[in-house]
Image (cartoon, rainbow, N blue to C red):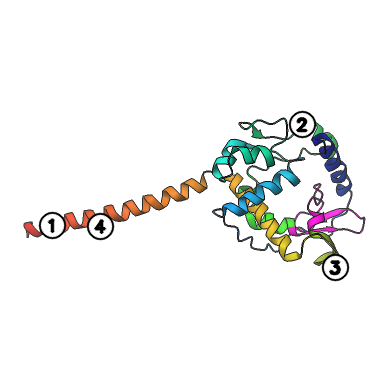
Amino acid sequence: MNKNVLIMLCSLVALAGVSGSAIAAGDAALEHANVNIRDTAAAQRGARLFVNYCMSCHSASYMRYNRLAEDLGLGEDLVKEHLMFADAKIGDTMEVAMRPADGEAWLGKAPPDLSLTARARGTDWLYTYFLSFYRDEAGSWNNVVLPNASMPHVLWQLQGIQEPVIVEHDGQPTVERLELAQPGMQSPEDYEETVRDLVTFLEYLGEPAELKRRNVGIWVLLFLVVFALTSYALKAEYWRDVH
């Protein structure tokens, strides 16, 4: 499908999502994402999900495709074949065609860049957010974690459609839990793994240097241990003659 058509469809669905009324207060308990940024396979799968489901509207302007190819062990050929649009170059940043002015006109607010979202929100928040979409009484997408979010549930075909169970709390209707009303292409367990992969990639986007930094940190700590032992041995040898 043409990239511009995808952007228009995303925009129209998002506008419909804005019309839904908020029921939840947005203070839902967060589930633990348990992501592992060193799980390269999960980050690779997350990169594919990000490109296929998120980049219609959201960019990751701090990341370049060639850096992605290197860090995730994909190689430039695989990145070009599976993660890049036809008009992109390997040295380009992960930008979308939607202009901020168009996004603001269509959605009321330009879709944010997702480069630092994991650092700003946290992985638990993102994980719970992607699990918490539901159809509200107006037939629009809503979210327990972020009520009245203008973003549609782009992963609904994988998860299915959830509906809220509403209870009265202090005189206000509140979402007690979500129930799966229409199954998706994946089981709930498989969908949770899919979301975990996507969140793993978003965490990598927030600090790509973390992969190398952790590896360097291990060698630095080993060096300090060896240095400390050597220094102690030299000190003991020196003071033995003094005494």
The residue that appears at 55% across and 43% down in the rendered structure is: 71
| Residue ID for mark 2 | 99
User: Could you tell me the amino acid type at mark 4?
Assistant: Leu
* The label number, if any, that marks residue 229 in the structure image: 4
Mark nearer the N terminus (3 vs 1):
3
| Residue ID for mark 1 | 237
* The label number, if any, that marks residue 205 in the structure image: none
How far separated are the C-alphas under marks 3 and 1?
A: 74 Å
Q: Nearer the viewer, residue 70 or 101?
A: 70
Q: Is disc 1 in contact with disc 4, using a CB cutoff of under 8 Å?
A: no
Mark nearer the N terminus (1 vs 4):
4
Give the crowd class for mark 1: few <14, some 14-19, many >=20 residues within 10 Å.
Answer: few
Give the crowd class for mark 3: few <14, some 14-19, many >=20 residues within 10 Å.
Answer: few
How far separated are the C-alphas under marks 1 and 2?
A: 69 Å
User: Could you tell me the amino acid type at mark 3?
Assistant: Val
Q: Does the magenta stretch mainly form a helix, a strand or a loop? A: loop
- Magenta span covers which residues? 131-158
Classify mark 1: helix, strand or loop: helix
Is residue 130 found inside the magenta-colored segment of the image? no
Q: Position of residue 232 (x, y in %)?
A: 21, 57
Viewport quadrant of the C terminus = bottom left
How far separated are the C-alphas under marks 4 and 2?
A: 58 Å
Is residue 151 found inside the magenta-colored segment of the image? yes
| Residue ID for mark 3 | 165
